[in-house]
């Protein structure tokens, strides 16, 4: 068999064999990591279970985990790009968390799993639905206006938080990083305008401008955007803020180099990178090396498996405590004053031992209204994805993939409403709607520095 044919079978998205093989190897490894590392090392944390699956549960888990990938074929729209990551880092851990949890009936487990599975099938088929093309706000906003707004917001942020700025190594100074993060968060408060400004810069203005600067070789301005991200990291101490600019530049260069290849093989690249890196970290996590243990915890506990154990934590908590009925959202609570807890949702779920912030299927889903909440959240996310595809239809596909990376980070770690408001996604919608890429092309080239 020719090598080209073998590569096609193993890596291309239009090969069902490739898709099934990637998912099957990944979920079996995930189960092993969850049992031996997450539960084995961190099982002392409240709410983390590993109840070995019987044959019926095991087969059901395999089928429900794999089924959505039958309907994925390649990266067609930004919605497919976003959903691929949500499938890998949210759906698969969520479903696994259900099937190894203690204290839930089979009816509850299968109800959650089947509803979620059906939604992800729909998400991967969304590109087949005709879009509302040409969503645009007139008159358009010139690029220099966006630059002025970005500069003003950056200066306001730095001026207000200069005393809280520190730089720490995210790998060797983890304890200091968490202490400074907590200290800085207490200083600014949860509803401060500065938090919104920070989210708008990270999730909207910076990635939007960075892609345009890279596209038209404005390298000095590109470096200034990277410096802006560094300034934000020195305040919020979030690892994602530190890593996002490197991911933006790396992925931009990669997708510009081989766009069609990335669209065809992104799923296999992600799966095999996670499989290989996770296997290595499992081997070295108990070597006694503090740095390797920290890296393993960041990658395995806090990234790959985090939705799995948080799913169990949220399910256990809301079996015994009242749902929020969306009152954990500040706007809703301002109207209803019905939030049932004295501390933020993430702290309440973790019984004040940590801040268990989680993805939207847990916060807007389980926490809000249990199974009904998951259904409503799935529907809201479906509508949101359709709107994202429609509003970005005037833009080059490779550009919007890069611009949406910070929003993707937020989706994986926060509620939909947090992503929209404090994460900058709503501002990003306005930028896409107000900006005309065709009008600005000549101007950018003419005044490029």
Image (tube, rainbow, N blue to C red):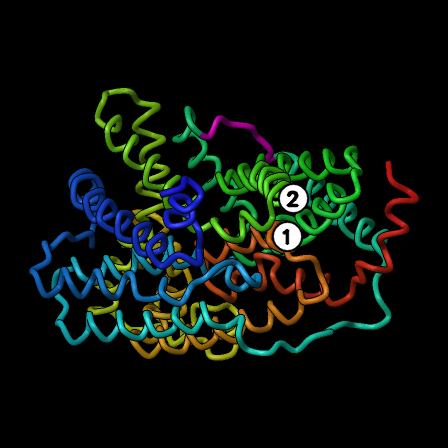
Q: Residue at x 23, y 64 (%)?
A: 63
Q: Residue at x 91, y 42 (%)?
A: 447
Please, which residue is most extreme toward the front here? 1
Question: Relative to residue 251, is residue 61 depicted above or below?
Answer: below
Residue 43: x %, y % from top left? 17, 45
Front one among 223 and 347 = 223
Q: Distance from label 2 to label 1 (Cα)?
A: 7 Å
> Residue 303, can we see it?
no
Question: Relative to residue 127, is residue 336 depicted above or below?
Answer: below
* Tag 2 residue: 256
Residue 29: x %, y % from top left? 24, 44
Q: What stretch is highlighted in magenta?
A: 164-170
Disc 2 and disc 1 in contact, CB within 8 angstroms = yes
Quarter where residue 173 is shown: top left
Q: Residue at x 23, y 75 (%)?
A: 111
Quarter where residue 222 is shown: top right
**Few, some or many C-alpha atoms within 10 Å of disc 2 (few <14, some 14-19, many ≥20)?**
few
Front one among 71 and 244 = 71
């Amino acid at each position: 068999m020719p090598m080209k044919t073998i590569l096609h079978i193993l890596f291309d998205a239009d090969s069902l064999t490739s898709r099934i093989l990637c998912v099957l190897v990944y979920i079996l490894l995930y189960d092993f990591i969850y049992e031996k590392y997450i539960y084995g090392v961190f099982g002392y944390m409240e709410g983390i279970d590993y109840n070995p699956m019987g044959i019926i549960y095991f087969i059901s888990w395999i089928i429900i985990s794999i089924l959505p990938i039958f309907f994925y074929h390649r990266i067609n729209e930004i919605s497919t790009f976003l959903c691929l990551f949500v499938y890998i880092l949210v759906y698969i851990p969520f479903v696994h968390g259900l099937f190894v949890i203690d204290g839930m009936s089979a009816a509850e487990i299968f109800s959650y799993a089947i509803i979620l599975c059906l939604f992800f099938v729909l998400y991967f088929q969304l590109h087949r639905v005709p879009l509302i093309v040409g969503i645009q706000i007139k008159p358009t906003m010139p690029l220099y206006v966006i630059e002025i707004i970005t500069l003003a917001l950056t200066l306001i942020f730095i001026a207000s938080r200069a005393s809280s700025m520190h730089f720490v190594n995210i790998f060797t100074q983890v304890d200091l990083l968490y202490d400074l993060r907590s200290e800085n968060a207490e200083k600014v408060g949860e509803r401060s305008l500065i938090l919104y400004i920070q989210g708008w810069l990270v999730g909207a203005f910076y990635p939007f401008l960075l892609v345009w600067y890279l596209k038209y070789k404005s390298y000095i301005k590109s470096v200034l955007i990277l410096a802006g991200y560094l300034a934000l990291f020195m305040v919020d101490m979030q690892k994602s803020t530190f890593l996002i600019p490197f991911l933006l530049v790396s992925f931009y260069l990669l997708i510009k180099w081989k766009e069609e290849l990335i669209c065809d093989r992104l799923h296999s690249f992600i799966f095999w990178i996670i499989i290989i890196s996770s296997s290595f970290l499992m081997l070295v996590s108990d070597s006694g090396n503090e740095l390797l243990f920290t890296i393993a915890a960041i990658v395995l506990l806090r990234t790959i498996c985090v939705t799995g154990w948080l799913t169990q934590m949220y399910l256990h908590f809301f079996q015994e405590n009242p749902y929020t009925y969306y009152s954990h959202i500040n706007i809703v609570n301002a109207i209803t004053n019905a939030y049932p807890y004295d501390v933020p949702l993430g702290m309440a779920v973790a019984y004040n031992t940590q801040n268990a912030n989680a993805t939207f299927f847990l916060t807007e889903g389980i926490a809000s209204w249990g199974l009904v909440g998951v259904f409503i959240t799935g529907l809201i996310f479906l509508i949101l994805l359709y709107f994202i595809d429609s509003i970005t239809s005037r833009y080059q596909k490779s550009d919007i993939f890069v611009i949406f990376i910070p929003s993707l980070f937020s989706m994986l770690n926060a509620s939909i409403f947090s992503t929209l408001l404090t994460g900058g996604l709503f501002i990003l919608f306005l930028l896409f709607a107000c900006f005309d890429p065709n009008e600005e092309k000549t101007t950018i080239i003419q005044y490029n520095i």
